[in-house]
Image (spheres, grey):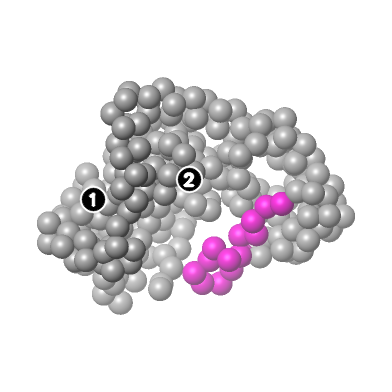
Amino acid sequence: MIGVPYDGDQLDVDALNRIAAEHSPAFFYTVPTFQNPTGRTHDVATRQRIADAAQRHGFRIVEDEPYRQLRYVGDDLPSIAAFAPEHVVSLGSFSKVVAPGLRIGWLRTTADLRPTVTIAKQAADLHTSTIDQAAAAEYLSSGRAEPALDRIRSAYSARRDAMLQALPLALPAGSSWNQPEGGMFVWARLPEGMDASDVLTRALDHDVAFVPGAPFFAGPADERALRLSFTTYSPERIRDGLSRLGSAVAAAG
């Protein structure tokens, strides 16, 4: 597995082209919209350039889109598949937009890959629960999905805003974080010299937790990074949690 670096908040597509030319990869995996863990989104120009790279170097793109519908501000962006449909395998999931326990995903691929994917799926688990599939089909055909999504987006947007508003008081001077337009996560970095894993130990003593960023890296890790999820709790609990996190960071510093 070879990681492709970012240039700021956008994928370094020049690096993608260099790596593809050197290693002839079978595929490039990406979460282009509200990525886990960073919440980053490839802009339209980057999506086009990724598609161009796939066509130039002959690799497939695995476009994983479980968070695509969780947009709170800004306009929807075209999928990478819109630019190079013959090179893209698209993935999605109902677990983020219908119910966490509904573990049903979907895959859109080209005709040449479909038989192989079908066999691989059957070898992995024989068959996805028929009852779960029937429940999902009934729910989607009932007309309740879009109103429910509107409620989810409204609630998650308020929670995101509460986190972003509270972060300046919770994290020490020299910290930084992004402001995702959707999804579930804020990606933050502590000041130079701090280690998010050490802060987590202190945070647990204050009855609050986060995910250190280091395990998400395919290459050298950023020990200062942390992933903060804002979708589970109310704005009031988020503000309380960040207040506790601020106390933990102060103790660690």
Looking at this rendering, what residue extends furthest in the left direction?
A: 111
Q: Mark 2 points at which residue?
A: 101
Earlier in the chain: of badge 1 and badge 2, it is 2
Q: Residue 20 carries which label?
A: none
Residue drawn at (71%, 40%) of the image: 167
Q: In the figure, 236 relative to 79: above or below?
A: above
Q: In the figure, 221 relative to 233: above or below?
A: below
Boundaries of the magenta span: 209-222
Q: In this orientation, which residue lies closer to the viewer: 131 or 139?
A: 131
Q: What residue type is labelled 1?
A: Arg
Asked if the stretch drawn in magenta spans residue 251, the answer is no
Residue 235 at x, y percent in the picture: 67, 30
Distance, label 1 to label 2, CA atoms, is 22 Å
Q: Residue 108 carries which label?
A: 1
Residue 99 at x, y percent in the picture: 46, 39
Looking at this rendering, what residue extends furthest in the bottom direction?
A: 23
Q: In this orientation, which residue lies closer to the viewer: 71 or 109?
A: 109
> In this rendering, does residue 249 appear at all?
no
Asked if the stretch drawn in magenta spans residue 221, the answer is yes
Q: Residues within 10 Å of mark 1 (few under 14, many from 20)?
A: some
Residue drawn at (37%, 28%) of the image: 145
Q: Which amino acid does label 2 sit on?
A: Gly
Quick one: quadrant of the C terminus? bottom right
Marks 1, 2: nearer the viewer: 2
**Element marked by disc 1:** strand
Q: In this orientation, which residue lies closer to the viewer: 75 or 142?
A: 142
**Element marked by disc 2:** loop
Quick one: quadrant of the N terminus? bottom left
